[in-house]
Amino acid sequence: MEVNLRIAGAAGQGIQTAADLLGRALTRSGLFSYLYNDAESRIRGGLNFCHIRVAPELRQGVAEHADLLITLTEPAVQVHAASLSPGGRILCPARFAHPRSVGIDIEALAAQSGSKITQAVTAAAVAACWLGVSPDTAGNVIAEMFPAGSKAAESNRRAVELGFAAARERPLSPPLRLPAGSPAGRLWISGAEAAALGAVAGGVRFVAGYPMSPATGTLTALAQWAEEAGLVVEQAEDEIAAINMLAGASYAGARAMTATSGGGYCLMTEGISLLGMIEAPGVILLAQRPGPATGLPTRTAQGDLRLALHAGHGFFPRVVLAPRDIAESFVLTARAFDLAERYQVPVIVLTDQLIQDAQASLDPFPVEELPRRRYFLTRDELEAMPAYQRYAITESGISPLAAPGTSRHTVVADSDEHDPDGHLTEVPSLSLQMAQKRLRKAATLARELDAPLAVEGDPRRHPLVVSFGSTHPSLAEARQRMADQGTDFAWLHLSQLWPLSSSVRDLLRDAPRLITVENNAGGELAGLLAQVGLRESDARIQRMDGRPFSVDELDARLREVLA
Amino acid sequence: MSARKEDYDSPVENHWCPGCGNFGILTAVRRALVELDLPPQRVLICSGIGQAPKLPHYLRVNTLNGLHGREVASATAAKLCAPDLTVLVHAGDGGAYGEGGNHLLHAIRRDIDITLVVHDNKVYGLTKGQASPTTSLGEPAKIHPRGVPSRPLNPLALAIALECGFVAQALSSRTDQLVDILQCAVRHRGFSLVNVLQPCVSWDKTRTYAFYDEHCAPVPADHDPADAIAAFRLAAQRTFWLGILHQRAGTPFDERVLPAGRGPLRDLGVEPERVGRIVGRFR
């Protein structure tokens, strides 16, 4: 039982505002919403849409059909009418004269609010009313979205009233109503914001970044919360500055991060290598969009996995984590800060546009059990040491970490090969010691982060599907649907891409068939599995047009390869 | 506690060419820091790659010897996270004005409280004699056998035009003046640029110690460093002026950006409960 709403129109028509209003109001009304954005890289015009899935439980798979379509432009009607479900209806200006129209002229209605820009909000209010949202809830939400007393606040307040009145006057048959539960303090939050919140939970104190879709939302959120979170955000002059600022902040002893997309990450790669060499902790949120080069700036992809795994010259240990959804963006970003400092390595959180720009109704994130430890030597510990060596040789490969200015010792870090004191050296035995130290650290990381894999189904009897990142929700729904109809497959979804669990090799060796699912052209995951498990995928399910896999598509394509 | 010269002793063997101008700068930095009564653990020197950036290894100080040209970016963030440190950057003319040109522009805009000391020998030393951004037009260099086809960058005029709050030039062999200038630069609250002219004894047979002695002149006694236009006029001349060309007080970036009354970002713990102060807006 679910309702799918789609709001389509041109950039600048307030589609995202209307969708945000709906999602938030529905969340407060005890329903779960999931919204994903499909937008062009422009500020005005074109054809954008927001799709909202509403259900009594959270469904984050990508749906293709709409039960109620709100269209603000004629091209939007022409393109999206095909996605109407049987019995689906359209809410649009009367002049479009669409046969599936519900007969409320949202254009004329919006004109009464005093501003025609409120058309999307007026339509959203109609939908909210039909879905059982109370006028008070919708009114409160819209009041929070615009500055109090502003002209926009007034016209949008009026638009909501008009929408509710029109919806009551013309009830939809059959009704859209869904059984609502208790809202229970649930959040309405985007992936970009969840990652930012995860960074706060992970103790971030310094953020440097250069705007680039789809990473920008995380930088913006952190900047807005700087005071409450106790952190500083600096918009760097370029990505090279951002990563080198991260290195400076981290060397100085603060937890630091940057956020970018593939192009910016490419600029940062020498800096990633620097973090590896000077063993500076750092978190890099790499929010993928399709490449190469500028690619599709506002679209989604999973094409940068091997970039995250390998970019940066020379060998140095690193961690690559990939959240599957908004909630995991929070958890993994928080965890990334702990891992980065514990192992003194760069940790890359590999997310994408689908997750970053999507919003969902989520239960509050658990913070009680998150790690709180800092791994720097304390002032007292340092003062008790006769000497301090930043790169002291240890069995684990991890040297005691000190920040400059916290004791009588000095802290020396060098991007050249260095001796245990941190001074540049070309002595072969010292170069060897340092290379071995970094290798031992990589081994320590692999050992200590080697968690057993959670495989669903029986990978020895059934074909094994392997995936990572944002394909998870759609795959989960497709798998359930197929299981209900008697088609089974085993499923491994990887959230930690590096170090990869040691059990991957056995799993791949024993699987009767290996199928990889990934949103890219290059077969990034298939390449990783071939490298680690010496096992080629028997079938690759890929998408490379910058759009996410939907549940229906995965269902159909999995059936095809499993048949 | 007073700082002593020996506190800055480093065990690291010096790799510079005998007679290099860098030695004068090293001596002057050490003297300036001691005379400013700064203990080594309170000083951070950031550097990149080249001969000049090896300087912090030859002093016992906190050192972040990072990437070529990125030293100013790293130093900016280090200062923000550990504002209790005195932060200097030592870079060559290649790192500061070539590879790191963009970072220099924006560090001046920010007015972050760090001192950038550029060892300006007008040649790439460690990569063996290529032109630098400050090499003269028409001068032959390794990759420019027929002469450098571009005009040289004028770092002093550039910095003054960007409203840099402290712009000075010194000569590596005139240690006393360099010590004075470095002290003023460190004391200045905001971004300071000290361009230090230095002969390259290995790759430049023209601009020798004698050449600089002949072509340098002290900033005129009647020059008012607060007058940016007058400073720009001086900087635009061919003379190698020695002294403080421009100085203007301002509010440095760290003061504008850092929340007042809280300790260094470096010292803050992990506080997951801060999430609770933020999530309200998502309900």
Image (cartoon, coloured by chain):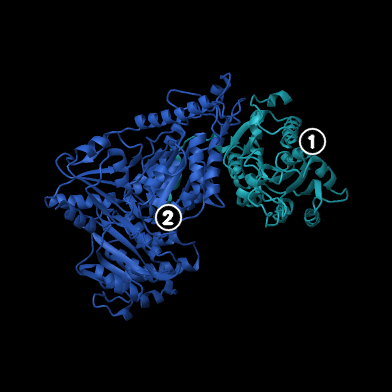
- Which numbered dot is residue A214? 2
Q: Quadrant of the N terminus of chain B?
A: top right
Chain drawn in cyan: B
**Location of residue A238 with respect to A9 vertically, above or below:** above
Q: Chain of mark 2?
A: A
The residue located at (78%, 38%) in the rendering is B178
**Location of residue B139 with respect to B57 vertically, above or below:** below
Q: Nearer the viewer, residue A353 or B210?
A: B210
Identify the amino acid type marked 2.
Pro
Residue A333 percent location from the top left of the image:
41, 42
The residue located at (49%, 62%) in the rendering is A148
Element carrying mark 2? loop
Q: Which label sits in the foreground, 1 or 2?
A: 1
Residue found farthest to the left: A486
Q: Which residue is mark 1?
A: B175
Q: Chain of mark 1?
A: B
